[in-house]
Image: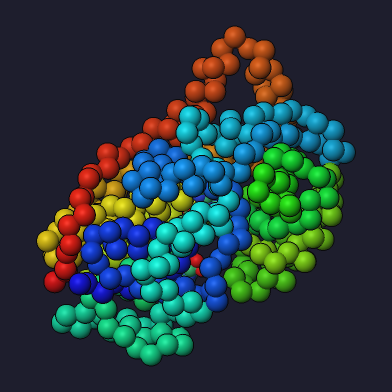
């Protein structure tokens, strides 16, 4: 049985472990966090990714854990309502598409794998040395071990990618925006509602889903590349406070609340572009290989589909990991490109440049329910997302046992 190390226990890692077990491999997941990371924001699962979840037998559980969001409201600096829209349209969802908290999905995937997959928490890969018949892996805490293959499923700032492919600056491309999200008290008593306060070049918001007592605050802004330390959370909070200084609505209170947040998150909105997703016995999956950015709304779906295709390609290759990695890239690359394309267009609508643009967008939203052509307008929003989300035909890889060379 092939021993495969997966670095990263987010979405791609556990999903890959699930499918590798199904195909008879022996995966081990190493996760840097001391325990499963169940915090996070809401994410969408749609199109081919829903089919993957269905094939895992988890579709009902995922749907049951959905956010059940109802409405998105836009307000001005005084809190006055400017426009509203359905949460479904706000998220570009249709039909069976599911919105779920990232932490709930991570928990469901972990529960589905924890009994027959080895999880090593509180550790990280520090060195990879390829030998004739495997990869010798050194860890921060645990003793060195040798695996047949190593998979980097460790997100946008992947350690495995840095070790096997080089500096992240060659692959991670900033889309000119930053995002910050954290848990805050639900002081507005929001119920399955999202409130957004758009301002030129920046947007702040707050939402509460059906499944949490707390709320999430979200800040989004356009900026050229900013020098900040990824490990210095206090410095990131200061930066955020500077960018949103003087903003109205609930912004000052939300900024204050970031100081107490247990899960403060701040990062650039970036995409990962690589010519190859594998090097020797090391391969990448999910955000580490082809993160489309939060603005695409498709990061989780790419991770789920990528994990399915990678595991299936390994099973179908009859033990030849080179052939498997080539098939994985061939089958997935078009799907990845179509989904990465969504981000630029979405960002334009998420952060508007001027007060005039905001007024116009709010006017259109107020008008939309009364327009005879509203269904066509709605389709123009949802159709590109639907097309990208279904731009792959999933193979049936069967459940054959395999071993890699
Ligand atoms: C603010 C925000 C909003 C988003 N909104 C959406 C959305 O609406 N729809 C959508 O589809 N996607 C969305 N995404 C993207 C989505 O969360 C990711 O694209 C998706 O989770 C990809 O999964 P992943 O497993 O590749 O990476 P991640 O979920 O980032 O998981 C990586 C894991 O690796 C671990 N790790 C990191 N380094 C190491 C290391 N050295 N050793 C061991 N473990 C390590 C991390 O702790 C983490 O658990 C959003 C992302 C953000 C940040």
Looking at this view, name the residue that lies furthest to the front.
Answer: 115
Colour scheme in the image? Answer: rainbow
The residue shown at (38%, 48%) is 57
Residue sitting nearer the eye, 324 or 376: 324
Looking at the rendering, in which quadrant would you find the C terminus? bottom left
Residue sitting nearer the eye, 208 or 391: 208
Judge whether 14 appears above or below 351 on screen: below
Residue 363 drawn at (x, y percent): 71, 23
Position of 341 compared to 213: left or right?
left
Residue 277 drawn at (x, y percent): 30, 61
Residue 29 drawn at (x, y percent): 39, 71
Judge whether 322 appears above or below 333 on screen: below
Position of 398 compared to 137: left or right?
left
The residue shown at (35%, 60%) is 18
Figure quadrant of residue 289: bottom left
The residue shown at (79%, 55%) is 185
Judge whether 104 appears above or below 8 on screen: above
Position of 366 compared to 148: left or right?
right
Q: Can residue 373 be seen in this view?
A: yes
Looking at the rendering, in which quadrant would you find the N terminus? bottom left
Looking at this view, name the residue that lies furthest to the top.
Answer: 372
Q: Is residue 273 visible?
A: no
Please state the total of marks drawn on the protein image: 0
Looking at this view, name the residue that lies furthest to the right.
Answer: 78
Judge whether 129 appears above or below 386 on screen: below
Residue 187 drawn at (x, y percent): 83, 50
The residue shown at (51%, 42%) is 63
Residue sitting nearer the eye, 134 or 214: 214
Looking at this view, name the residue that lies furthest to the bottom.
Answer: 143
Position of 25 compared to 110: left or right?
left
């Amino acid at each position: 049985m092939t021993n495969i190390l997966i670095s990263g226990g987010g979405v791609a890692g556990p999903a890959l472990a699930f499918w590798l077990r199904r195909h008879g491999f022996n995966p081990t997941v190493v996760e840097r966090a001391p325990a499963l990371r169940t915090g996070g924001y809401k994410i969408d699962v749609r199109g081919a990714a829903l089919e993957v979840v269905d094939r895992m037998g988890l579709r009902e559980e995922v749907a049951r854990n959905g956010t059940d969001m109802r409405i998105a409201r836009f307000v001005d600096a005084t809190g006055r309502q400017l426009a509203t829209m359905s949460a479904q349209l706000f998220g570009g969802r249709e039909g069976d598409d599911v919105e779920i908290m990232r932490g709930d999905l991570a928990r469901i995937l972990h529960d589905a794998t924890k009994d027959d997959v080895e999880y090593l928490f509180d550790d990280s890969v520090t060195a990879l040395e390829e030998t004739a018949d495997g990869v010798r892996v050194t860890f921060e805490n645990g003793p060195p071990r040798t695996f047949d293959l190593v998979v980097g499923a460790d997100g946008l700032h992947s350690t495995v990618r840095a070790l096997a492919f080089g500096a992240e600056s060659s692959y991670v491309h900033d889309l000119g925006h930053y995002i910050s999200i954290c848990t805050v008290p639900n002081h507005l008593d929001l119920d399955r509602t999202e409130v957004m306060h758009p301002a030129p070049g920046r947007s702040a918001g707050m939402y509460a889903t059906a499944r949490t007592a707390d709320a999430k605050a979200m800040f989004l802004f356009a900026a050229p590349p900013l020098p900040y330390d990824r490990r210095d959370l206090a410095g990131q909070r200061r930066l955020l406070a500077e960018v949103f200084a003087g903003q109205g609505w609930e912004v000052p209170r939300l900024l204050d609340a970031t100081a107490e947040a247990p899960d403060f998150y701040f990062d650039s909105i970036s995409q990962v572009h690589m010519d190859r997703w594998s090097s020797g016995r090391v391969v990448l999956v999910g955000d580490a290989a082809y993160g489309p950015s939060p603005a695409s709304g498709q990061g989780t779906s790419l991770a789920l589909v990528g994990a399915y295709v990678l595991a299936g390609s390994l099973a179908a290759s009859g033990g030849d990991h080179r052939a498997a990695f080539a098939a994985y890239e061939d089958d997935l690359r078009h799907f990845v490109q179509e989904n990465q394309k969504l981000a630029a267009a979405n960002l334009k609508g998420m952060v508007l440049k001027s007060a005039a643009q905001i007024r116009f967008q709010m006017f259109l939203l107020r008008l939309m329910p009364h327009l005879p052509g509203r269904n066509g307008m709605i389709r123009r929003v949802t159709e590109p997302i639907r097309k990208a989300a279904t731009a792959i035909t999933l193979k049936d890889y069967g459940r054959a046992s395999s071993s890699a060379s």
